[in-house]
């Protein structure tokens, strides 16, 4: 690709991205979401967090407490915090604190 083609692709990609985002902002107040979709959007943050965390749990870290990986113990502790607090930010902070504490103590 020569230079004008590259710039044309960059401008087109930016225009498409901008139009998709602007459509939701400009038309969002006029469009009505179905109740099922509105309720299901409440689960998006938890699903995204799980999608980020799950791959990291499948690779061996080398930091273990007996037969258990420290990340698994931090995950279980964060799960208990999530169950009790029902707050994503508190869950994230507790999970990271448990993970860093486990690595500092056993790693």
Image (tube, rainbow, N blue to C red):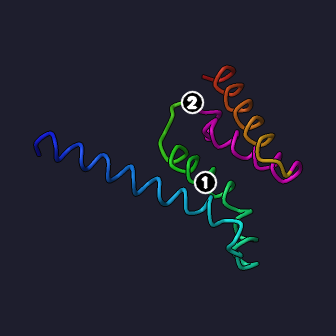
Question: Label 1 crowding class (10 Å Cα cut-off): few <14, some 14-19, many 20+?
Answer: few
Taking the spot 49% from the left edge, 60% from the top edge, the residue there is 20
The label on residue 48 is 1
Q: Which residue is mark 2?
A: 63
Instruction: Please tell me which residue lies in front, 22 or 65.
Output: 22
Q: Earlier in the sequence, mark 2 or mark 1?
A: 1
User: In the figure, residue 97 lies in which quadrant?
Assistant: top right
- Per the image, label 1 sits on a secondary structure element best described as helix
Q: Position of residue 48 (x, y in %)?
A: 61, 54
Q: Position of residue 67 (x, y in %)?
A: 61, 40
Mark pair 2, 1: CA separation:
25 Å
User: In the figure, residue 38 lies in which quadrant?
Assistant: bottom right
Task: Say if the magenta span includes residue 14.
Answer: no
Instruction: Please tell me which residue lies in front, 39 or 107.
Output: 39
Specify whether 53 is left or right of 15. Answer: right
Instruction: Please tell me which residue lies in front, 16 or 85.
Output: 16
Instruction: Please tell me which residue lies in front, 99 or 13.
Output: 13
Taking the spot 39% from the left edge, 49% from the top edge, the residue there is 14
Which residues, given as a range, are shown in magenta? Answer: 64-85
Q: Is residue 93 above or below residue 101?
A: below
């Amino acid at each position: 690709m020569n230079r004008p083609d590259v710039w044309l692709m960059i401008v087109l990609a930016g225009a498409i991205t901008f139009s998709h985002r602007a459509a939701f902002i400009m038309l969002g107040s006029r469009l009505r979401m179905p109740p099922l979709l509105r309720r299901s959007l409440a689960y998006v943050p938890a699903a995204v967090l799980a999608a980020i965390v799950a791959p990291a749990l499948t690779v061996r870290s080398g930091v273990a407490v007996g037969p258990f990986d420290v990340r698994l113990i931090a995950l279980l502790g964060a799960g208990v915090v999530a169950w009790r607090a029902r707050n994503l930010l508190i869950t994230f902070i507790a999970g990271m604190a448990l993970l860093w504490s486990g690595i500092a103590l056993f790693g």
